[in-house]
């Protein structure tokens, strides 16, 4: 597959030629071809400016359409996308970046026809979803350009925000970067009983970074160590704002960047009410003023705007860069709220592991000294057995470690940050392992037997081979 896309430049030429052929404005062919030279220009303004400077014209936040039917189609294809202030050429699911937000309920039977209209192989993986091997969209399951794949699976997860994205080997970073990702919300009775904010008061926020060339198209020139875009996007919108009423909102946050870790805060210093993460509701909600999350991780946050004066602007910020991500503009309507403002959930606790496994995340593309081989099964895991898995790294972090086929519970972190954070309680499917950290998790595969993968969710590391196959049997 490396030979298919031997080099970024050639890749862009292929993409761009394909797009140019499809689009009416072929006059931009020359400009787009210049893009192949990867000539990066620094984005004009530091998005939002982080205070001071010329006031920025903000664009209304894109909220992707919802799919609520249990039988639906997803088509991946090149297309154009409105960043809010400019049009850009991207790859999309169902013409959206992000793709539509799927909403399903535990117990539903889902049927999806995936149509790959990209100029190269791909496959959809349902990140966080407990599905069997055939429905898991692993690298070995890629389908070619023009082909389609039928998925059929029951929803057995509890309520949570999951997501879908491509999972080809060696090109996942590029495909996700180009715009292929979407949210997948699962509901259940436990969550429904809490009467949490819904409708326009529940907003998915897909956070990522991007760099644009001088004609406004995405540039992806990763190094082995990763890729860090120069500007943030929220739901595919650059410098967005969202009008919020004086109400309680529920934000479903997904870190959809390829490498970048996001440290979130509100500019007024108010806390988020942290109620959930990757695996749904936490054992106990808590107030958090800053939350740091890595690619693939999710957050379920309540923000109470009821006591905020109308006309106030509050910024969702990323503290590592100083980026302004999203401006909340508080309007005058006061909306009463009778749902939960704190939550608890009796999450079963895994204990007494029978087996211990050790994984060293080495360099920028190996686990336990090995590069991924999609035809090699690296180890076997007995079905239904609780195990202790240790993740360790000496450098080249952050490594957000992700496991398919089961959620896990983080029980310790030593070295580095040396603690477990409140958003790492309950069920997780990604855990951030920074340099010199050792993280222990308990895991039990009790949904399906079959081959699954574990990998670094820094997608450039994954593309380098920081991934393993294992078989649950
Ligand atoms: Cu989010 Cu193996 O993937
Ligand atoms: Cu996954
Ligand atoms: Cu990594």
Image (tube, rainbow, N blue to C red):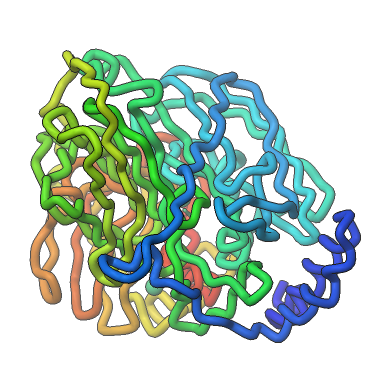
Q: Quadrant of the N terminus?
A: bottom right
Q: In which quarter of the image is the C terminus?
A: top left
Q: How many marks?
A: 0
At 23% from the left edge and 26% from the top edge, which residue is drawn?
Answer: 247
At 27% from the left edge and 36% from the top edge, which residue is drawn?
Answer: 330
Q: Would you say 254 lies left or right of 439 here?
A: right
At 45% from the left edge and 68% from the top edge, which residue is drawn?
Answer: 231
Which quadrant of the structure image shows residue 177? bottom right
Q: Where does the image place residue 23, in percent across and percent down from the top left?
A: 86, 55
Q: Where does the image place residue 354, in percent across and percent down from the top left?
A: 20, 51
Residue 337 can be seen in this image = yes
Q: Where does the image place residue 280, in percent across and percent down from the top left?
A: 28, 35
Q: In front: 372, or 62?
A: 62
Q: In front: 314, or 287?
A: 314
Location of residue 194 with respect to 148 vertically, above or below: above
Q: In front: 206, or 131?
A: 206
Location of residue 109 with respect to 41 vertically, above or below: above
Location of residue 269 with respect to 220 vertically, above or below: above
Q: Would you say 79 lies left or right of 227 here?
A: right
The extreme front residue here reads: 54
Which quadrant of the structure image shows residue 398? bottom left
């Amino acid at each position: 597959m490396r030979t298919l896309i031997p080099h970024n430049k050639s890749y862009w030429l292929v993409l761009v030629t394909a797009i140019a052929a499809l689009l009416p404005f072929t006059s931009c062919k020359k400009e787009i071809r210049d893009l192949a030279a990867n000539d990066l220009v620094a984005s004009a303004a530091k998005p939002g400016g982080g205070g001071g400077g010329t006031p920025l014209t903000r664009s209304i936040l894109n909220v992707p359409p919802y799919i609520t039917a249990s039988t639906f189609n997803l088509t991946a294809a090149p297309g154009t996308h409105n960043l809010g202030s400019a049009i850009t050429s991207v790859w999309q699911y169902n013409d959206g970046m992000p793709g539509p937000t799927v909403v399903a309920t535990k117990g539903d039977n889902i049927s999806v026809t995936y149509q790959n209209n990209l100029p190269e192989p791909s496959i959809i993986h349902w990140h966080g979803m407990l599905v069997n091997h055939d429905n898991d969209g692993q690298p070995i399951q890629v389908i070619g350009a023009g082909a389609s794949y039928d998925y059929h699976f029951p929803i057995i997860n509890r309520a949570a925000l999951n997501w879908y994205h491509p999972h080809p080997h060696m090109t996942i970073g590029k495909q996700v970067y180009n715009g292929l990702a979407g949210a997948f919300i699962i509901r259940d009775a436990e969550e429904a009983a809490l009467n949490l904010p819904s409708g326009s008061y529940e907003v998915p926020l897909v956070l990522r970074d991007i760099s644009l060339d001088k004609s406004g198209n995405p540039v992806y020139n990763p190094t082995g160590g990763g890729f860090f875009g120069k500007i943030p996007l929220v739901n595919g919108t650059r410098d967005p704002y969202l009008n919020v009423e004086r109400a309680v909102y529920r934000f479903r946050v997904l870190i959809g960047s390829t490498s970048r870790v996001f440290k979130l805060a509100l500019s007024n210093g108010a806390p988020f009410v942290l109620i959930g993460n990757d695996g749904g509701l936490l054992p106990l909600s808590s107030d958090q003023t800053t939350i740091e999350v890595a690619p693939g991780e999710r957050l379920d946050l309540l923000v109470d705007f009821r006591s905020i004066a109308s006309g106030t602007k509050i910024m969702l910020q990323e503290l590592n860069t100083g980026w302004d991500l999203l401006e909340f503009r508080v309007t005058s309507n006061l909306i009463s709220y009778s749902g939960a403002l704190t939550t608890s959930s009796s999450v079963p606790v895994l204990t007494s592991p029978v087996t211990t496994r050790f994984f060293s995340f080495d360099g920028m593309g190996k686990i336990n000294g090995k590069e991924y081989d999609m035809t090699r099964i690296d180890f076997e895991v007995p079905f239904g057995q609780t195990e202790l898995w240790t993740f360790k790294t000496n450098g080249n972090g952050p490594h957000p470690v992700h496991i398919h086929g089961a959620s896990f519970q983080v029980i310790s972190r030593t070295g580095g940050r040396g603690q477990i954070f409140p958003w790492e309680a309950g069920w997780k499917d990604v855990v951030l392992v920074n340099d010199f950290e050792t993280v222990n998790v308990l895991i039990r595969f009790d949904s399906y037997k079959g081959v699954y993968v574990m990998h670094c969710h820094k997608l450039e590391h994954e593309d380098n081979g920081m991934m393993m196959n294992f078989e649950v049997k």
